[in-house]
Image: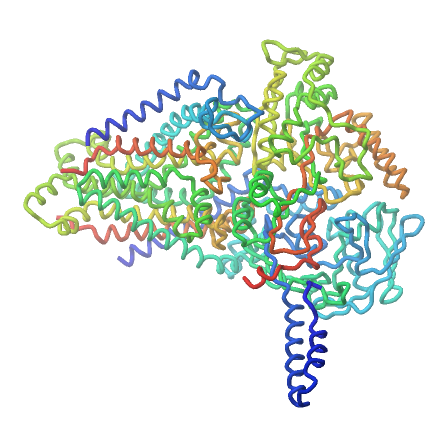
């Protein structure tokens, strides 16, 4: 088991490094990397504009940049943000807790809402409860994230509520289908006919079937929550990683973007790998 | 509940029919600017009022339906197929394929695709035809949208690989692609259907956000996404409630889709 | 004074009324009253309150010499002390840190006499050495300061001479037009303070900065300015600046009372807010800003040769200009809070505006005649050039400006009426910038120009054909057309004399040429719209930046608002 975890961790590290390089390449190759809004200022002399362009040219060689970055990172220096002029380490340290709190709470709330609706649909076996879940999740799936975030600003609602509402329809969509399929298995019908209690059916027959996939779903919902955090934090004024990511993307801030990608990669890989490990641990011994 | 499914079917057919009849229902077209009455409330001439440059919103909703309702499901189909291929196939094959697919998927989920989109726009000519722009946009969305559900599918397919009935099927001589298509794929349906259903509105909304980068539907073509973006400036819904109609339409259509797609009845 | 009465008259009254009381009780009463008076006056002096508004972007720097973006400019305005300030209302130059100044006859030298007894926010004394340090640093070629560059009228270094702690002379290598007015942009830095750029002379000082979310400015305890009653300014205790790029959220927060002013208000919000509470919104008339369209005339641009021929033809550009309905743009996009523009100078810039020029009227016939002269013809509703190529081009704009996107849609429809097919392309700003300044792979662009300076000399790098910002065809080795050569000559002429009449004559002719040749097709001058909540007293919004808080040191919060905080 420990060996398995060690292998997972090693592959995570390798993938994170690869992710950093790929994202740096994506940013570098996208048009507009070299341009600086200062060039439009008519009071700048020709020499000044040349100097500004030369500054940007220093980031041209991506392999160079990346190897310097990694070397510094190992020594604790994650680079300095071009747009905000502050060390990336400080920015991340200040903002990570905010995002963890907001996205985490939002995700938990979203799961609560989605599972309540999904289980209500399956346990009660009334088409009305399924319809309710479908309509509710349909409504929130179709409302743009920016509008939900704005609505939460208007109504003075906390940011995590907006994230919960953005995420829960997707969780509901998957979990409802998974649970419905599990409940539709023939032996459930037989168990019900025999008078087995719902809770026992759930624990003994449904969860073992749907469980692994629900755990895998849980892994990817973390990425979904992080994605939802970007518009919500920016519009609700929450100083978290999402707001930072949006700023960085708009200003092509290479150091910040590379760090953020690697952070997101780490979180995604950890989430999904933990899900994999859990699924493996829960797998019943082969007969 | 049969009745509900029939009702859902009727709604979808009605919406499609209305959008195809756009030429008759809204003869002025989606681009004509009634410059005397910008931002007007609903009236007999303009059933849903006019937008901020005076274009008839009802016409724009009808024509926008054609684009969004045709292309978003197509893109959703592409992303579902890719997810089935990468996630499902890898899970079914197991071993090194599964590990590689999972690593690839996780990396795919984490990269900032915004920059790829910006690059794609730069590679397209400036004067690209609206049709080409729209097709490219939805194609890209389909190609980029498979990763999340592929992850879940890989777990499902992995579990199926070792399940009794697959072992049985193998034992009875069935193998390879036929085994995958006949026994494994159908059991992945819950996740695939869920992904298809979720992807449609996500792509519709994403198309509008891509408009900011120069992709998406080009002016003056309308799309549901661009109509929904109008809502962003709406601070008090009470003042102009008719602006919510595109949203309501999308919700109704999506709910109908889900009702039709949920072939797993929850009643005994 | 905020309008509260001093307590001394009541003290006198009290003594007269209580004649018969014992001395000790009178003493006690007096002491009590004196204490109350003291508390009351200090309470009044400190009851300035906290002003809150938003910055639309992150301030990129706190170094006053490297300021280039709006947010940093706002911070510099509030924290920086300048030698002379342009009064945003009267547009006259007024003494600030300098009591007086004198410009030499040849326009190359300026001498300042500075005020005495002034200290930076950290206590360091302010002397002429600080002025010398600031100017030398600004003109340092290695720094690439845009403030310094605006003084750079010719090659060579400046010479600063500190005659005494209150007197300084600065000599420039070449004459600089409007030399004194340019010091409005030079915030003096301390030569000796350990705090470097954080030691300031302005009314406020940066107290706390949360990158990406907010900026908190506090009253500068050493601010030198006093009001007419001798009380220290600023009245406000602090200013809270939130970094909020989204205008919908900004508007929401203003409506809820969380923000006290919106410096530049969108037309939609102006009307919505104004219909409910007209006393909160202000329309100060046409601003100095303009929006315009231009065509790519670069000889080596990667566009088809026949398109380049269209864009370089004056008849084509003027035809496009005549085919755009500017009245509709002003009416629909700005709801009447704009007027058709004529050229680079807005009519509210009364001295420099060439009043002989009238906005180009919407005239399809005239447009078609101009096109016919170049061999264009209509066929089946589509316009074709003389080689039968259909006239089709892309109009690019930066994302994020709703007014410009709407203007593009109106232009697309207008030009469609003369058979021209316009494809609107919205791009993210860095991509757009790369296309228009480096790769030149664009056809037509619609952008706006935010003018902060009344004097057109600041636009030299736009009108000189050899300059970077000569947007339609930058960095020409030699002027490629006769009219661009003439503009070059006229711009140099207006920069070489300090006689305002001669300068105006030259620049009027420049405006005339631009009008005739239409390298920029000017659309509208939009009005300066702003909103100020009723809790702020003393604000008089104008058209020059910063429109609402240009007199920040004299703004106060009304009692109710301060009590709420």
Identify the residue shown where x is 86% and y is 51%: C172
Identify the residue shown where x is 72% and y is 61%: C202
For this view, does C531 lie left or right of residue A265? right
* Depicted C414 relative to depicted B158: above or below: above
Identify the residue shown where x is 64% and y is 43%: A36
Q: Nearer the viewer, residue B229 or C371?
A: B229
Residue C71's x, y, as percent? 64, 50
* Depicted A91 relative to depicted C285: above or below: below
How many discs mark residues in the rendered view?
Answer: 0
Residue A124's x, y, as percent? 18, 44
Q: Looking at the rendering, in which quadrant would you find the N terminus of chain A? A: bottom left
Q: Residue furthest top?
A: C379
* Depicted B65 relative to depicted A156: above or below: above
Task: Please say whether residue C46 is visible from this viewpoint.
Answer: yes
Identify the residue shown where x is 73% and y is 38%: C468
Task: Please say whether residue C438 is visible from this viewpoint.
Answer: no
Splitting the image into 4 quarters, where does residue B54 fall?
A: top right
Residue B76's x, y, as percent? 36, 32
Q: Residue furthest right?
A: C105
For this view, does C466 lie left or right of residue B3? right
Q: Nearer the viewer, residue B182 or C80?
A: C80
Splitting the image into 4 quarters, where does residue B151 fall?
A: top left
Q: Nearer the viewer, residue C196 or C559?
A: C559
Structure colour scheme? rainbow
For this view, does C151 lie left or right of residue A143? right
Q: Nearer the viewer, residue B213 or C273?
A: C273
Splitting the image into 4 quarters, where does residue B108 fall?
A: top left
Residue B261's x, y, as percent? 26, 32
């Amino acid at each position: 088991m420990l060996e398995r975890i060690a292998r997972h961790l090693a592959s995570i590290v390798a993938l994170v490094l690869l992710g950093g390089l790929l994202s740096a390449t994506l940013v570098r190759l996208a048009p507009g990397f070299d341009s600086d809004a200062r060039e439009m200022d008519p009071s700048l002399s020709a020499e000044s504009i040349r100097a500004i362009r030369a500054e940007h040219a220093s980031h041209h060689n991506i392999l160079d940049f990346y190897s310097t970055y990694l070397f510094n990172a190992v020594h604790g220096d994650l680079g300095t943000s071009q747009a905000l002029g502050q060390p990336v380490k400080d920015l991340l340290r200040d903002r990570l807790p905010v995002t963890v709190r907001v996205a985490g709470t939002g995700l938990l709330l979203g799961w609560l809402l989605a599972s309540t609706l999904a289980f209500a649909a399956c346990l009660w076996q009334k088409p009305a409860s399924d319809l309710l879940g479908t309509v509710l999740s349909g409504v929130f799936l179709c409302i743009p994230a920016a509008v939900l975030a704005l609505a939460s600003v208007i109504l003075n609602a906390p940011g995590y509520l907006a994230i919960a509402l953005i995420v829960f329809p997707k969780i509901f969509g998957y979990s409802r289908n998974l649970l419905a399929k599990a409940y539709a298995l023939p032996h459930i019908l037989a168990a019900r006919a025999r008078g087995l209690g719902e809770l026992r059916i759930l624990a003994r027959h449904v969860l073992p079937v749907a469980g692994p996939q629900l755990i895998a779903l849980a892994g990817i919902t973390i990425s979904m929550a992080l994605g939802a955090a970007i518009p919500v934090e920016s519009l609700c004024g929450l100083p978290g990683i999402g707001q930072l990511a949006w700023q960085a993307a708009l200003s092509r801030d290479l150091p910040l973007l590379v760090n953020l990608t690697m952070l997101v990669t780490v979180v995604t890989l950890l989430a999904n790998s933990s899900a994999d490990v859990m699924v493996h641990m829960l797998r019943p011994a082969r007969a | 509940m049969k009745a509900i499914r029939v009702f859902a079917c009727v709604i979808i057919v009605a919406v499609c029919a209305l959008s195809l009849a756009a030429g008759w229902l809204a003869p002025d077209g989606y681009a004509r600017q009634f410059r005397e009455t910008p931002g007007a409330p609903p009236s007999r001439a303009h059933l849903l009022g006019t937008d901020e440059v005076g274009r008839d919103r009802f016409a724009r909703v009808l024509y926008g339906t054609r684009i969004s309702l045709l292309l978003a499901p197509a893109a959703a189909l592409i992303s579902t197929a890719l997810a089935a291929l990468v996630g499902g196939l890898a899970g079914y094959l197991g071993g090194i394929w599964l590990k590689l697919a999972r690593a690839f998927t996780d990396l795919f989920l984490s990269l900032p695709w915004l920059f790829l989109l910006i690059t794609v726009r730069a590679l397209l000519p400036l004067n690209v035809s609206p049709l080409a722009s729209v097709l490219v946009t939805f194609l890209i969305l389909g190609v980029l949208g498979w990763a999340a559900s592929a992850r879940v599918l890989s777990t499902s397919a992995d579990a199926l690989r070792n399940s009794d009935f697959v072992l049985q099927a193998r034992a009875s001589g069935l193998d390879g692609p036929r085994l995958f298509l006949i026994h494994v794929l159908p059991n992945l349906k819950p996740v695939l259907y869920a992904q298809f259903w979720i992807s449609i509105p996500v792509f519709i909304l994403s198309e509008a956000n891509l408009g900011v980068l120069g992709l998406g539907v080009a002016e003056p073509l309308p799309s549901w996404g661009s109509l929904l973006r109008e809502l962003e400036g709406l601070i008090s819904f009470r003042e102009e409630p008719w602006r919510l109609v595109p949203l309501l339409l999308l919700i109704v259509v999506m709910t109908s889709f889900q009702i039709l797609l949920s072939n797993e009845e929850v009643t005994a | 004074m905020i309008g509260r009465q001093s307590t001394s008259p009541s003290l006198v009254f009290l003594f007269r009324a209580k004649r018969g009381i014992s001395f000790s009780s009178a003493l006690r009463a007096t002491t009590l009253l004196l204490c109350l008076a003291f508390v009351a006056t200090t309470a009044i002096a400190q009851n300035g309150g906290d002003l809150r508004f938003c910055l639309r972007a992150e301030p990129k720097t706190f170094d006053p010499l490297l300021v280039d973006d709006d947010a940093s400019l706002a911070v510099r305005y509030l924290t920086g002390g300048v030698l002379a300030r342009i009064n945003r209302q009267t547009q006259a130059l007024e003494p600030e840190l300098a009591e007086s100044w004198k410009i030499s006859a040849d326009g190359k030298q300026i001498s300042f006499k500075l005020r005495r007894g002034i200290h930076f926010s950290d206590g360091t004394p302010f002397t002429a050495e600080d002025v010398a340090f600031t100017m030398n640093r600004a003109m340092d070629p290695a720094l690439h300061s845009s403030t310094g560059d605006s003084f750079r009228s010719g090659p060579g270094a400046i010479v600063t001479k500190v005659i005494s702690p209150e007197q300084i002379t600065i000599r420039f290598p070449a004459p600089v037009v409007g030399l004194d007015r340019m010091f409005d942009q030079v915030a003096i830095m301390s030569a000796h303070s350990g705090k470097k750029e954080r030691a300031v002379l302005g009314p406020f000082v940066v107290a706390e900065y949360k990158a990406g979310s907010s900026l908190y400015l506090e009253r500068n305890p050493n601010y030198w300015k006093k009001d007419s009653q001798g009380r220290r300014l600023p009245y406000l205790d602090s200013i809270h600046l939130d970094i909020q790029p989204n205008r919908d959220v900004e508007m929401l927060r203003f409506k809820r009372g969380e923000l006290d002013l919106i410096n530049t208000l969108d037309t939609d919000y102006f009307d919505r807010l104004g219909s409910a509470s007209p006393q909160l919104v202000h329309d100060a008339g046409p601003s100095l800003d303009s929006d315009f369209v231009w065509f790519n005339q670069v000889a080596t641009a990667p566009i088809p040769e026949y398109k380049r021929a269209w864009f370089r033809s004056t008849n084509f550009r003027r035809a496009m200009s005549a085919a755009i309905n500017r009245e509709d743009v002003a009416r629909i996009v700005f709801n009447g809070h704009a007027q058709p523009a004529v050229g680079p100078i807005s009519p509210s810039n009364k001295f420099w505006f060439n009043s002989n020029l009238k906005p180009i009227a919407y005239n399809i016939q005239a447009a078609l005649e101009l096109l016919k002269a170049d061999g264009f013809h209509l066929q089946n509703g589509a316009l074709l050039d003389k080689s039968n190529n259909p006239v089709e081009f892309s109009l690019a704009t930066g994302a994020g400006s709703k007014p410009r996107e709407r203007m593009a849609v109106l232009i697309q429809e207008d030009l469609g009426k003369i058979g021209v097919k316009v494809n609107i392309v919205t791009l993210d700003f860095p991509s757009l910038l790369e296309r228009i300044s480096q790769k030149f792979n664009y056809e037509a662009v619609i952008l706006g120009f935010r003018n902060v300076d009344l004097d057109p000399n600041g636009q030299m790098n736009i009108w000189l054909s050899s300059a970077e910002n000569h947007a339609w065809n930058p960095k020409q080795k030699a002027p490629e057309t006769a009219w661009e050569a003439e503009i070059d000559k006229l711009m140099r002429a207006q920069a070489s004399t300090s006689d305002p009449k001669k300068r105006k004559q030259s620049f009027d002719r420049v405006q005339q040429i631009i009008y005739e040749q239409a390298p920029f097709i000017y659309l509208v001058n939009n009005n300066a719209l702003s909103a100020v909540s009723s809790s702020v007293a003393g604000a008089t919004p104008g058209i020059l930046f910063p429109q609402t808080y240009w007199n920040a040191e004299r703004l106060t919060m009304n009692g109710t608002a301060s009590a709420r905080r």
